[in-house]
Amino acid sequence: MIDTDKLRQAVNTFVHQARPSDSNRQSPATIGDINKLIDRTATVLNQFIDEIEKGH
C-alpha cells in the first residue's frame, strides 16, 4: 500500500527546501537556485517512485 502521508511529507519538504535563498521576489533566479530546484524536484519524484514500487 502506498503511504500517502509519506508522500505529503515529501511534498512539504520539497516546498520548504526548493525555495530560493533570496527572499526578494524581484530578484532573478540564479543558476544555483535553478540547480537547487532541479535537485529537489528529482528527490521528491524519486520518493514518489519509491512509494509506487513498494505498493506493488
Image (tube, rainbow, N blue to C red):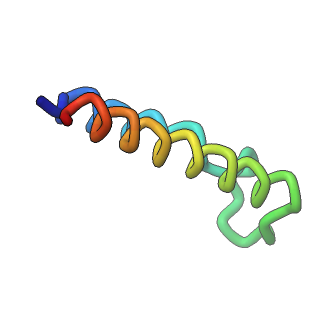
Q: Position of residue 48 (x, y in %)?
A: 36, 42
Residue at left 88%, top 61%?
A: 31
Q: Residue at x 27, y 28 (%)?
A: 54
Residue 25 visible in the snapshot: yes
**54 displayed left or right of 31:** left
Residue placed farthest to the front in the image? 56
Percent coordinates x, y for residue 37 in the rendering: 66, 53
Query: Eyeballing the image, is 27 above or below 20?
Result: below
Can you say whether 37 is above or below 6 in the image?
Answer: below
Residue 12 located left or right of residue 6: right
Question: x and y percent of residue 21 in the render?
Answer: 73, 45
In this picture, is 29 found above or below 16?
below
Quadrant for the C terminus, please.
Answer: top left
Q: Quadrant of the N terminus?
A: top left
In front here: 44 or 50? 50
The front one of 9 and 42 is 42
Residue 30: image quadrant is bottom right
Above or below — where is 6 with respect to 46? above
